[in-house]
Image (spheres, grey):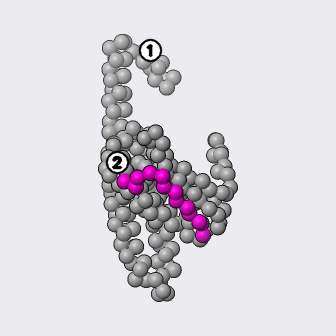
Amino acid sequence: MKDRVNYCNSLSSDECFKELEHLSQKLINAEKSRDRFLSLIRNEFDNPLVSMTSLMKILEKSLKGKEEYETFRLVYLDMLKLNYQLNNIVAMAAVETGVLEKNLSMFSIKAMLDDIDDALLHLSENKHFIVLRNFNCADELYHDRDKIYTILLNLIGNAYEYSTSKTEIVIDVFEDDNKLYFSVKNRGDKIKDPDII
């Protein structure tokens, strides 16, 4: 950066202005490329993973009790883990780029929590949690389901990941002053602060 400033100081004001325009255009092009890449990842990876998840749920029923079931189960759990990580990457990239489109629709909170349980099976399968859900609100909500899903997926995912086996996880959903609140309580290890390099 210092070299760029010195370089600009050695130019006339017209040349410096042209250099700044050139750099500004490069930045705009880079942001457009990043947005296209984010959209491509979201569409090209999300659609097949959603289809695979649905198909694997159907396949699971037909394989239960057969000797191939354990191998299938390992593949299924790894696919759920991949989907979970990919959703987080896409969500983080969307927040960083400011590409947060609203997609309002009516949806069931209970059905969404069922979907989250299915998506987090790779974290909860062998821990035998007792998950309690308390609702003090209407089940139908008009909001951006994808954003609420992503937020709750991470909150509940953290509870599943850091809870001790055979403990309670309590999910409360309630309304107060026309606002909807979600609370996730669990018992387990404290999440460690990330190492700062």
Label 1 Cα crowd, 10 Å radius (few <14 / some 14-19 / many 20+): few
Q: CA distance from mark 2 to mark 1?
A: 56 Å
Callout 1, which amino acid?
Answer: Asn
Horizontal side of 35 relative to 172 (left or right) equals left
**Total number of numbered labels?**
2
Q: Quadrant of the C terminus?
A: top right
Q: Residue at x 36, y 41 (%)?
A: 99
* Residue at the spot of label 1: 9
Q: Position of residue 82 (x, y in %)?
A: 46, 61
Please name the predominant secondary structure of the magenta segment in the image. Answer: strand
Which disc number belongs to residue 142?
A: 2
Query: Where is residue 71 drawn, in percent x and y?
Result: 49, 79
Q: Are marks 2 and 1 in contact (CB under 8 Å)?
A: no
Which stretch is magenta? 128-140
Question: At label 2, which amino acid type do we have?
Answer: Tyr
Write the residue at 43% across / 83% down: 63
Mark 2 Cα shell of 10 Å, populated few (<14), some (14-19), many (≥20): few
In terms of image quadrants, where is residue 130?
Answer: bottom right
Which residue is nearer to you in this view: 160 or 20? 160
List x then y, in percent, for residue 59. 39, 78
Q: Going 38% across and 57% down the picture, which residue do you hit?
A: 108
Q: Which mark is residue 130?
A: none
Query: In the image, is residue 173 above or below residue 160?
Result: above
Q: Is residue 183 above or below residue 120?
A: above
Mark found first going from the N terminus, 2 or 1: 1
Of residue 21 and residue 38, the one placed in the foreground of this image is 38
Q: Is residue 163 left or right of residue 115?
A: right
